[in-house]
Amino acid sequence: MRFVDLFSGAGLFSCGFVQQGFSPILAVDLSGDAIASYQRNVAPVGRCGSVSDLERLPECEVLIAGPPCQGFSTLGRRDPLDERNALAFEVVRLAATNPPDVVVIENVPPFLRSAAWLQIRNGLIALGYDVVPWELDASDYGTPQYRRRSFTIASRVGTPEIPKPASAMVPARTVLSRPVDPDDALHRWPAPTPLAEGRMRLIPTGGDKRDLMRAAPDLCPPSWRQVGCQATDVWGRIDPDKPANTLRCAFQNPSKGRYIHPTANRVISLREGARLQGVPDAWHFVGRNYPVARQIGNGVPVPLAKAVAGSIRQLLVNNVDAAA
Ligand SMILES: C[S@@+](CC[C@H](N)C(=O)[O-])C[C@H]1O[C@@H](n2cnc3c(N)ncnc32)[C@H](O)[C@@H]1O
């Protein structure tokens, strides 16, 4: 069962498909670092360049794609004219050149409620696909992180079953309390300034900037007290007994979310971030700190990708059995 990955990033989505026995034959991404990581960890089939420059889809059973989500994300401006939204249409254009059995498009949940999604769905229906949308949370599929994602499944071989959730949630401590190899080059984080470290010392487990404002107003900038600056998760310390909050690309910046280590006065390392995304410790990411954090924070959590890939595999197997 061959697959192509468009907007592959470092290949977290691909990894779930490989774990279910699929073979990647092509992965395309604009980022050289991400493609170098893909080559190293997934398979040497990466191509650095724009999906828009790909003329034809090679013969494959499954096409997977995670087009940029900034234009649809609730964190962005959700501008329907954002040109990054147009990249999602490339998936339909390429599917039309050599239609695979199944197309899977991953994105943020608001994508499903966008005008672009309706157009993409209609385009896929016109190619002969049945289209179903799924909204799944990675924490229901064995990932130690809450992360909701949408999957648009277009199939010409029947409707896949929505993957069954795991029996229990996995708390962050499962991966964050496991020792990291001291030689692991990814176990790195930006050293906090004395002010940042002083703030972190006062933030309890599960706490955040509001605890700091109560305990030490002198350590807080005046802007935190201004009305309209009510983001609660920032300068948050991860609660090890729950799945972590959604990891974003800036997960090594404490002012961007709940990224302080459960017990140490620092943000989580790149390796710890990768673990919260379900990435095996054998993986190494290529690039400097922020490009690596982007590859990790942009990815589909591997256990969620694996659960989706399992449903697609079952569909293809059932289809072969029915044909025999
Ligand atoms: C959401 S990330 C994909 C993450 C990936 N599915 C994973 O699980 O690791 C989107 C990717 O699209 C890439 N990208 C943006 N514009 C592109 C283009 N025109 N052609 C190819 N890749 C592009 C970015 O470099 C980024 O890696």
Image (tube, helix red, strand yellow):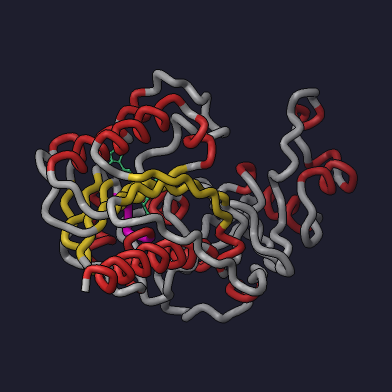
- Indicate whether residue 134 is drawn in magenta: no
Residue at left 84%, top 41%?
213
Horizontal and vertical percent position of residue 96 = 18, 39
The magenta segment is 8-12
Kindly tell me whether residue 23 is visible in this rendering. Answer: yes
Horizontal and vertical percent position of residue 20 = 35, 73
**Front in this rendered view, residue 139 or 59:** 59
Residue at left 64%, top 54%?
245
Task: Examine the rendered structure and indicate whether residue 216 appears above or below residue 259.
Answer: above
Quarter containing ligand 1? top left
Kindly tell me whether residue 50 is visible in this rendering. Answer: no
Horizontal and vertical percent position of residue 321 = 28, 73
Horizontal and vertical percent position of residue 77 = 52, 24
Q: Is residue 172 left or right of residue 138?
A: right
**Front in this rendered view, residue 223 or 239:** 239
Q: Is residue 41 left or right of residue 244?
A: left
